[in-house]
Amino acid sequence: MHFPYLYHLYRITSVSHMKKMISGQQMYSFVESYAHGLQ
């Protein structure tokens, strides 16, 4: 399982995405749906 790598990649993309469009609520819902996708 390459979870640490995927998580690292996710962190990088989420940071650059947040710099493009800073929207806390949208980011939260994305993180929530991402977490549900892991289970």
Image (tube, rainbow, N blue to C red):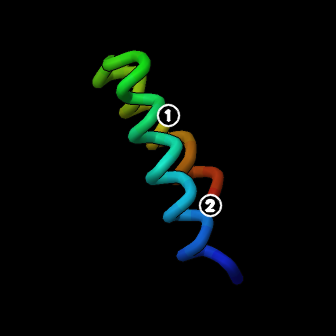
Q: Secondary structure at mark 2?
A: helix
List x then y, in percent, for residue 12: 47, 50
Q: Quadrant of residue 25?
A: top left
Per the image, label 1 sits on a secondary structure element best described as helix
* Amino acid on which disc 2 is placed: Leu
Residue at 60% across, 74% down: 3
Q: Residues within 10 Å of mark 1 (few under 14, many from 20)?
A: few
Q: Residue at x 29, y 24 (%)?
A: 24
Which residue was labeled with disc 2? 38
Distance from Cα at disc 2 to Cα at disc 1: 13 Å
Give residue 11's position: percent from left, percent from top. 45, 53
Q: Residue 22, percent across and down? A: 32, 19
The first of marks 2 and 1 along the sequence is: 1
Near-viewer residue (23 or 16): 16
What's under tag 1, amino acid-wise? Phe
| Cβ atoms under marks 2 and 1 closer than 8 Å | no
Q: Residue under label 1, please give it.
A: 30
How crowded is the residue under tag 2: few (<14 C-alpha within 10 Å), some, or many (20+)?
few
